[in-house]
Image: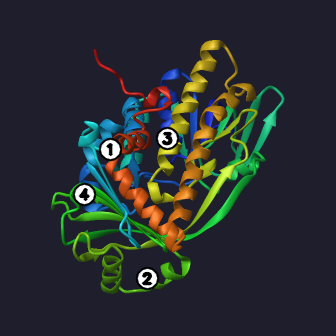
Amino acid sequence: MTNHQHADVIIVGAGMVGLTLAAGLASSGLKITVLEQRDGDISGVSTLPDLQMQGYDPRVSALTCASQQVLTAIGAWHYMQEYRLSPYAFMDVWDGEGTGHIHFSAAELHEPSLGHIVENRVTLAGLHRAIEQWENVQVLKGVTVTDLSVEHDLQRTVSLDNNAVLSASLVVAADGALSKTRQMAGIPMWEWDYGHDAIVTTVKTEKSHQKTAWQRFTNDGPLAFLPLSSDEGENYCSIVWSTSPEHAKEVMSLDDDAFCLALGQAFEHRLGDVLAVDKRFAFPLRQRHAKAYVRPCFAAIGDAAHTIHPLAGQGVNLGLMDAAQLVDTLTQALERGESIGSERVLKRFQRERRSDNLQMSAAMEGFKRLFDDQQPALALVRNMGMNLLDKLSPLKNHIVQDAMGLSGRLPTLAKRVIKE
């Protein structure tokens, strides 16, 4: 690599959101450079046999229909299907401290599924294979951004730890919740602790998961069992157990047998006994939201701009919608002959995405507080409300259609193509 290079767009971070943006912009003809701190095989998947030998990735995402459409439109979903996808047709949600229960069904919506549980490395592998088709997209691995500056001619200059310098009309931060690039751009965050740690792992259950995403709410946090496809049957689930830091520390210290027993009890043995567990991981949950998404020649997307509680599995979907909307905004700017780094242009992206992301953040905070509070009167109203909603099919289906990305305002890449 020469000491100084120019690109039209520099994307910092080769995760799912950054690569989606790169693939979405590829057909525009813009020269795109993706910078990634990690080296080697970023996705961790090179071939189908390689994936099967590795077992399940503990990091999974519940991809909505809108996210599936984005990944299809940019050419990644086709490759992901060659690996492993886990569609789910039902969702069961209940109040573990009461009688409230809601059941969602794809058949009621005349859809083949409510969404897909997909291992993150599978999505990354599909995205890498999609961008390999484009000569105007390059991924530089094993590099770290050390400085970010603004040039007088509406350009950003990025300095790397290998002494290389890159300039671009637009720099996009897609480097995660603790984004150094966003910090270098001088964008502060609102953030607070949820008071939860999330435990994630893969488990084998006695009974079939029935292609159902299960979620039990307790006063200590939600517990989700997410169905995974397997040649051995339907007995594997990815779990996300959100609980107090004290309880998380306690259950993480248990041996595998004791952990399986505690997990089965917490889940009310809905799928029978938990027979086996993979390596467990725990991390604290914080809500974050950038006070702005854009600066001149700069934008933040995905976790670099916002993080929410995983109880509804919407985090990565919000990030993919950010990427798809930024593709729309930049494509329209090019058609109008505008600079893609213009703050006026970038604020159009911010207006489109910030309100939706804030609404989802507020909804997740509201859900958490609703189930945290165990006052008898509130618990009674909560359970009555859940049971009533379950019976009001039109309202229930409208809510789940919005969550799936089948209605409302959507970026172009997320819209279904209606065939004549």
- Taking 193 as reference, is 279 left or right? left
- Tell me, yes or no, if residue 138 can be seen here: no
Closer to the camera in the image, 164 or 176:
176
Q: Nearer the viewer, residue 168 or 141?
A: 168
The residue indicated by pointer 3 is 320
Q: Position of residue 147 (x, y in %)?
A: 75, 48
Q: Amino acid at mark 1?
A: Ser
Circle nearer the N terminus (2, 1): 2
**Among the two numbered marks 3 and 4 on one chain, the one whose residue lies closer to the N terminus:** 4
Q: Secondary structure at mark 4?
A: helix
Q: Nearer the viewer, mark 3 or mark 4?
A: 3
Q: Quadrant of the N terminus?
A: top right
- Marks 1 and 4 sit apart, C-alpha to C-alpha, by 40 Å
The residue under label 4 is which amino acid type? Gln
Residue identified by numbered label 4? 52
Disc 3 to disc 4, how far (Cα)? 26 Å
Numbered disc in front, either 2 or 1: 1
Is 178 displayed left or right of 188 in the figure? left
The residue under label 2 is: 251
The answer to which image quadrant residue 206 occupies is bottom left
| 400 relative to 163 in the view: left or right | left
